Image (cartoon, rainbow, N blue to C red):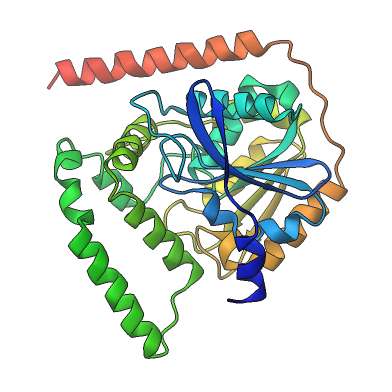
Amino acid sequence: MSSHDSRWARLKPRAITVNEERVVYRCAGKGPLLLLVHGMAGSAETWRHVMPALAKRFTVLAPDLLGQGQSDKPRGDYSLGAHANTLRDLLDALGYPRATVVGQSLGGGVAMQFAYQFPERCERLVLVDSGGLGREVTVYLRMLTVPGFEAVFPLFCAPPLRDAGNLIATWLGRAGVRSTPASQEIWRSYTSLADAGSRRAFFRSLHDVIDLSGQAVSALSRLYRAARLPTLIVWGAQDPFIPVSHAIAAQQAIPGSRLEIFDGVGHYPHCEAPERFVAVLIDFIASTKAARLSARGVDRVTSMCAAASAASLVSKAGRQLGR
C-alpha cells in the first residue's frame, strides 16, 4: 500500500442519522470547512486523491449523498433541492455553521442549489466539471433516459459482466497496462449500479437533470446571483462528458469568478491532476474572503425554484399527453 493509500485508509467512514436516514461521511483535518460533493453514481471515495492533502489546512467533510455510496437509499426525492436540504441538515447535525462548497459533476449542480437555497451557509463556491451549466452532455447519459431503458439496464451491470471486467483489468495490470484515474472513477460508478437501491436512486437523479435532448436543468440565467460569492470554476480541457465551453460561459456569467482549465485532463481534475487541484483550491481560498451573505431572500429564491420545478413537471406532462 502506498503512503497516499495509507493516508486515505485512515480516514474511516462515519455515519450519522439525518431526518431518519443514515448518511455516511468522511471527515478530517482542522480549520475552515470544505464540503466536498461528489457526482452521480459516486461517493466520497472520489476525493481520495486530494482529501488527505486538503486536511492539512482545512476541515474536510465528504459525504456520500443519499442514494449513493454507503448512505441509505430511500424511495424518495433525489432532486438537486433534496440533496441540498440533506447537506444543510448534515451541517446542522455536525455543528458546522457554514462551508466552502466544492461540487463535481452532479455535485456541482447540488452545490449551486445549496448556495441558492442557503446563501448564509455558503462561504465560497467551487464548481468542478459541473452539471447544470448548459444543454450539452455526453450521448451515453442521454441514451440512459430512453423510455424503458431502466428496466433492461440491470442486464448491463449483472455480476458476471462486472466480474469479467475485473478479470480483464487484472490481466491488463499484470501485462503492465495501468488503468487511469478517470477509468477507475468510471468503473467504480458502473459497479455501484449492480445494487438495486443505488440503481433506482441513479435513475431518479438522472431523469431529474437529463433527458434525450441533453441537460434539462440550467443555472446560467441565475448565476449572476453568485456575484457576491467567491467562485472558482475548475474544468478538464478534454472532458468527454460535459464540454469545457460550459466553464467559459459560467465564468462570463459570474462577475469576479475565477476559471482554471486543466490541459490534458478529463472529467475528474481532482483525480487526474490532484496536486494541481489542491494547489489551485488552496490559493483560491487563501486569496478570497469568506462570504457572509444574509438569509434574506431565501424564501423568494426557494419559491422561484419550486415554480421552475412545477413548470418543468407541467411541460413534461404536456409532452407525454401529446404523444
| Residue 296 placement, left or right of 191 | right
**Could you tell me which residue is drawn at 45 percent across and 44 percent down?**
70
Q: Is residue 137 left or right of residue 193?
A: right
Q: Is there any visible trace of residue 124 in the rendered image?
A: no
Horizontally, is 314 left or right of 259 in the view? left
Q: Nearer the viewer, residue 69 or 267?
A: 69
Residue 55 versus residue 220: which sits nearer the camera? 55
Q: Quick check: 237 above or below 285?
A: below
- Residue 44 position, x and y percent, is 55, 49
Give the image location of residue 238, x and y in percent: 50, 64
Residue pictured at 56% horizontal, 70% vertical: 264
Identified at 27% across, 51% down, the residue is 194
What is the x, y in percent for residue 304? 54, 13
Image coordinates of residue 292 in percent, x first then y, are 83, 25
- Which residue is located at x 46 percent, y 11 percent? 307
Q: Quadrant of residue 136?
A: top left
Name, please, the residue furthest toward the bottom: 175
The answer to whether residue 50 shows anywhere in this view is: yes
